[in-house]
Amino acid sequence: MASAHDTIFALSSGRLPAAIAVVRLSGPRAGDALKALTGRIPEPRKAALARVRDPAHGEVIDEALALWFPGPKSETGEDTAELQLHGGRAVVAAVFAALGRMEGLRMAEPGEFTRRAFENGHLDLTAVEGLGDLIAAETEVQRRQAYRQLKGLLGDRAEAWRKRLIEALALVEARIDFSDEADVPEELVGPALKIAGELDAEIAAALASAAHGERLRDGLVVAIAGPPNAGKSTLFNRIARREAAIVSPIAGTTRDVIEVHLDLGGYPVTLLDTAGMRDSADPIEQEGVRRARERALTADLVLWVEDVTEPALTTALLTAPVVWRIVNKIDLRKINREQDIRYKVSNTEFYLSDKEEYGFNSLLTRLADFVATYFGLEPALVSRERQRTLLQSTSHALKAALAEETRGREDIIAEELRTAATALGRLTGRVDVEDILDVIFRDFCIGK
């Protein structure tokens, strides 16, 4: 049975075969295991060349670099060791077999190294989430946001909020429990609620950008929609810079939603190519149109593509948040585009000709600007639904405490402040009710 006291090991590098394979160990017997494999424990935090042998028969498995990180100054907070081996499958399998025969050692479960780092106070939950996002980051802006979360962008702020909230709660608790003490001031609830009001305003500001922070993890969704044979798939392929969708002069070629993930100026974008929207007796095409409408309605931006030679269709059928009108194939109309005001690029209307390569660069530039403006220049404090939900719970409790100011129910105020503090504690994974008493004793010298 798995135990938190076991020494765990796992492959911490990429898929095999590879140039290097990093095998990591963490736990009370990490040093014993390293010595059994290499014959010695190297100087802490300095790489040492070592021959890795199977303790069962002494045969050399590989030559590797060995590293030793004694706890608590290690990534997990425990004794930690690493072997940087040659990345062959047989090499790693032999090392795993040797480790698996040692008493007290077992294979790590998914995420267990990070979990131990959290349990030993080296990471809070927001940093753990930032680490996961950093590993999954595909664009530069995603990487920046994830790294800032890993380094405490939200966690440090939440912990500072929680400490201030504990100060406020300590004031109210002192007023309730120690009102007869001579050294406890009578007016304590007012200052406590002042702190609560300031915190609520700061949390509201953080929540204002929560949607953008969460969206940055998954990417802004841009849907290309419109009637059949208007050039949607051609535009899709040009933006994607590859032949991701089948292009055909036959109307109704695209039957299902096709999507690609793009890096647009460092920002993640999910681009959708949808089926042409029209009435059809074909049940398969009907389903494609239904899916197209469904995805387009939930997109952050819709590029509504029309053929310049066809009657303009109203976009009223498409009530997406933002819709840009793309008039395509304008090479089929003999118009002096330099003189006709209708063919001047606007913020929401563009004229394209794939044949003449006209208008595409203007559209792409505007699209990149739209994405950058959407996400903003400042990093969002909140990047996950869990974080947003807990901050909303905190704000709700703070507002409830503030609403009790005129009623004078100090016990209700204390309970709401306690609820808010608990929500913030859950945000970082650090909930400790004892530190409320610590503040009371420190500030008011109660019990002397």
Image (cartoon, rainbow, N blue to C red):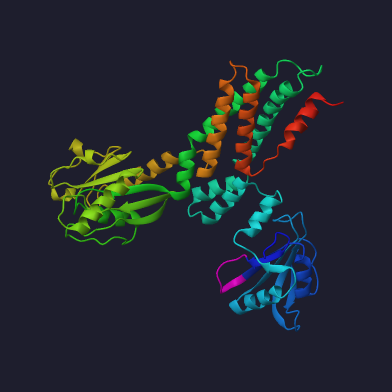
* Image spot of residue 179 (x, y percent): 76, 19
- Residue located 76% across and 30% down the image: 439
Q: Is residue 355 visible?
A: no
Residue 125 lies in the magenta stretch: no
Magenta stretch, main secondary structure class: loop
Q: Nearer the viewer, residue 409 or 161?
A: 409
- Judged left or right of residue 188, residue 404 is left
Whether residue 256 sits left or right of residue 67 in the image: it is: left
Which quadrant holds residue 326? Answer: top left
Coordinates of residue 336 in the picture (x, y in percent): 16, 42
**What residue is shown at x 34% (from left), y 47% (from top)?**
222
Is 18 covered by the magenta stretch? yes
Which span is picked out in magenta?
A: 12-20
Compare residues 353 and 70 and report the one nearer the observer.
Answer: 70
Q: Position of residue 444 (x, y in %)?
A: 79, 24
Using residue 177 as the reference point, say whether residue 220 is left or right of it: left
- In this image, 280 relative to 266: left or right? left
Looking at the picture, does residue 135 appear above or below residue 25?
Answer: above
Q: Residue at x 16, y 42 (%)?
A: 312
Query: What x and y, as percent, mark residue 283?
Result: 19, 57
For the N terminus, give its image quadrant. bottom right
The C terminus, quarter of image = top right
Quarter location, residue 297:
top left
